[in-house]
Structures are given as C-alpha cells and as structure tokens.
Image (cartoon, coloured by chain):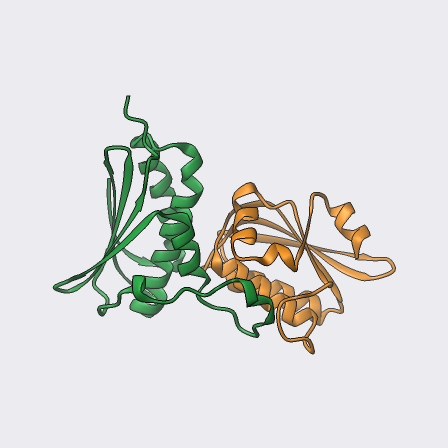
Chain colours: A orange, B green
Amino acid sequence: MSENLQIGVSREDGDKAVAIMRLQGSLDANTQGTLEDKAREAVDGGAEYLLIDMSGVDYLGSAGMRAIHAITTMLSPTEPGMRSSHLKVVNPSPAAAKVFKTLGFDSFIDIHSSVDEAIAAF
Amino acid sequence: MLLKVVADLGQLSKIREFVSDSAAALAVDPEALDDLRLAVDEAVTNILTHGYDGSGEIELELSADGADLIVRLRDTAPPFDSTLVEPADPGPAEDREKPGGFGLFLIRSSMDKLVHRKLENGNELTMIKCDVIDRI
C-alpha cells in the first residue's frame, strides 16, 4: 500500500453490486498499482460495477489514467477498449477533470458530481 | 530554484511539491501551477521508467526569463530525445487494448515549448511556459 494514496472501499448492493472506492492522495506512477490492486480485489469479491470517488485526489497524471483503463478492462473483460458502462467517476478536481478531457476519457467514462447521483445512473 | 536528487517513483510527490514551492517563489500565475506539476511529473516519470529503469539522478531547475517560466530537467540516462517521439492521439484510445504515450501528450498540451539537448553524459529537457510571470 502506497503512503501517498489511501483507498477506502464500501459496497452498495442494491439492484446492482456496486463497489465504491474513495481515494485520498495522489494518483501517479507510484500509486497506479495500488488503485489497480484495490479494484481487482473488489471485482474478485463480486463487484460488477465500480465507482471511483476522486474528491480527495490532489493529483492525477497519465499513470492514473492507465489504471482507470485497466479497471475498465477488469469490469468488461470481453470488450476490448475503454468504453464501459460499469465504471463511473465522481467529483474530480478541475485539474483532474482537465486530464480526463485532454486525453479524451470524458467521452467514454461518465463523470458525476456526487456518489448518489453516480449510483443512480448505473 | 534547483533540486538535485537520486529519485525513484516514491519521490514524485516531493518533486511536485518542489515545483509548487519554486513556482510560488518565482511569482508564477497560480493558474499555471497544475500544468507545471503535470508536465514535470510526466517528464520525470518517463526518465525514471524508460531512461533509468527505476531510479537515478535527476536535476530539476525552475527559473524565470522575463514573463516566461523555464523548467530544465537533467538526467544521466542514455541519450533519448522525447521531443522527436510522435505523441499518442488520445482520440482512438477507447479502442485500444493497452493505451500508451499519454504522458508525452500531456506534457505537450501543458507546456508551450520543448527543447532536448544531448549532454556529455545524459539529457537535458527544457520546457517553457510562456507569459505566466507578472513582472511589474
């Protein structure tokens, strides 16, 4: 576990099994694997849908985006590429939202302003 | 402002902090800070992962040239000119099984000018952000 990224995971098992990952810290090349490992644990534990709450993320770089790509593949292993209705992102900072937009991720990953709104959208 | 360090990926947050502190000391427009941190983080990550295979000497210097901010990044890794690499077009990324090249794309979108210089023993990457220092 990296000191620079803490991840709390909870479950919302309503109509769909959603894992909520609340990130606190930096999402860079040093912590990319931490996020991927936590997501893998959630998926192996039965989560079919995943929500990443980025409210506490103070830095997002390309390594973080590669982790997010890897997670889309975990959630939809039979669909190559990044489009996934099984992953949603909540409340990135303006800087993080800019990275999503610059790399074009905002066109195929839904970004929501609150956890409740994102869960309702699954 | 100069930082010399034998760096590994665990020090990326400290390197970004150095960028923030140096930019503040040089009176850089705070709105440019996110772009600067992103460009330096991506460039250092590239050096550590591709040039050094994990860790190595990094020299990071921030200075002002009129209204422009100059970032110089020196390493002792094998010669490599990242400015000649064709950046990944993020457009079709959703169709890729393993996307790459995003770091270089983010560096180029964050900074106004990039210059590579081969040193006797390593590389120097100069990244320039124009018109971000208010000289009253």
User: Which residue: 73% across, 69% down?
Assistant: A45
* Relative horizontal placement of residue A15, taking residue B51 as reference (left or right): right
Query: Is A94 on the left or on the right of B120, as rendered?
Result: right
Residue B88, how many percent across, how many down? 45, 65
Q: Position of residue B134 (x, y in %)?
A: 32, 27
Point out the image quarter for the N terminus of chain B: top left
Up/down of A111 relative to B68, above or below: below
Q: Going 69% across and 65% down the picture, which residue do you hit?
A: A84
Q: How many marks?
A: 0
The picture places residue A68, in percent across and down from the top left corner, at: 59, 62
B34 relative to B101, above or below: above
Q: Residue farthest to the bottom?
A: A78
Residue A87: which quarter of the image? bottom right
Q: Tell me the quarter of the picture where residue B87 sits.
A: bottom left
Taking the view exactly as shown, the residue that stands out farthest to the top is: B136
Which of B57/B62 is in front? B62
Do we see residue B13 in this rendering?
Answer: no
